[in-house]
Image: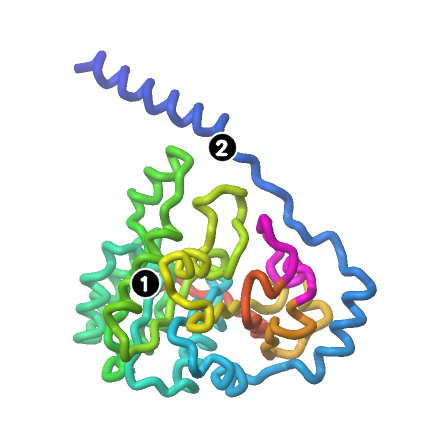
Amino acid sequence: MKKTIIIVVSAIIALVFLRIILEPKEHPDPFTGFKNSDLAVVKNELHNSQLSIQDVATQIKLKKILLVGEDHHVTEPQQYFTNLLEQLGDSSLVILLELSEDSQSDIDSYILSGEEKYLRAVLGKSNNLTLEHILKWSFKNKTKIKKVLAFDENFWHVGFNRLFLTDSRNETMAQAIYTSYINNSNSRIVAYGGQMHMLKGGRYRYDNESRVPIFTRLLKLGISESEISSIMLSGKTKFPLDSIWQTPSAVLTKGAFGKLPFEYFINSPVFKVKNAEELFDIFVNLGDLTDIKKYE
């Protein structure tokens, strides 16, 4: 028995050591400074390009699927998200959240009953984001919500994949959105999670197929690009352009802002793209951000 334990532990140590050797190295953040010509574009275009939340709702009114990317662990993205849903005024929504799939039964019970013990069970998982605001809003608006789905993989699944240098989360999320789209023809499908998952194109952090974001995967599944919108939520100190664009508002990328380098908005490594329009349709500057307090 002792010999078996030693062999198993040694094998695990060897596997972890091999993983460390083989893991791709992190690339540096791409932003190195603004070009003067780009600054001139921003200063010329910004005043007439800023959109209110009502304007954003008008822009996406006809979209069947919304992919909303947040900066984690701050309050304002969740607040903007629920305010945007209220502006849209839909009578039937399917909301998919970046929470582990094993949270689903507790989410169902919470939306049905509103009992805090179920909310506590969801938010108490160490790998779950603190999406308390969205879950509470969903309970209060449950008459127009067909389903709230946890569409991320479980902790052990994610950990096992990472151990072997693989990642299937984007595909899992895309399949959940696609299934919701097919099975709920009269509902708007709204997915909320980290920015990188919700990008339109490219490959983030590492240049490999597992890092292709959800939008691209939905296109491959046969959904028309005209039915999807990618919306990024960020704020002060989270993106380089905030030093110039200081008024909370949104901009579209189908105009001059879309031609700017993506790293002005998303200062993380993304491969095979250059400009903002390749990564998202709408970018929202929320201004000052507030850290979320741990749910207790």
Residue 151, placed above or below residue 5: below
The kind of secondary structure element at disc 2 is loop
**Is residue 49 found left or right of 119 in the rendered image?**
right
Q: Which of 258/196 is in front?
A: 258
Q: Residue furthest right?
A: 36
Q: Amino acid at mark 2?
A: Glu
* Mark 1 neighbour density, 10 Å: few (under 14) some (14–19) many (20 or more): many
Residue 292, placed above or below residue 10: below
Q: Which of 189/100 is in front?
A: 189
Quarter occupied by the N terminus: top left
Q: Main secondary structure of the magenta part?
A: loop
- Residue 35 appears anywhere in the view: yes
The kind of secondary structure element at disc 1 is helix
Query: For the residues marked 2 and 1, what is the alpha-carbon distance in whole angstroms?
Result: 31 Å
Q: Amino acid at mark 1?
A: Tyr
Question: At 32% from the left edge and 20% from the top edge, which residue is drawn?
Answer: 11
Question: At 44% from the left edge and 83% from the top edge, which residue is drawn?
Answer: 61
Label 1 sits on residue? 178
> Between disc 2 and disc 1, whose residue precedes?
2
Labelled disc at residue 23: 2
Inspect the magenta stretch and tell me whether residue 274 lies in it.
Answer: yes
Location of residue 290 in the rendering, given as x and y in whole percent from the top left corner? 52, 69
Quadrant for residue 264, please give it. Answer: bottom right
Question: At 69% from the left edge and 53% from the top edge, which residue is drawn?
Answer: 31
User: How many marks are shown on the rendered structure?
Assistant: 2
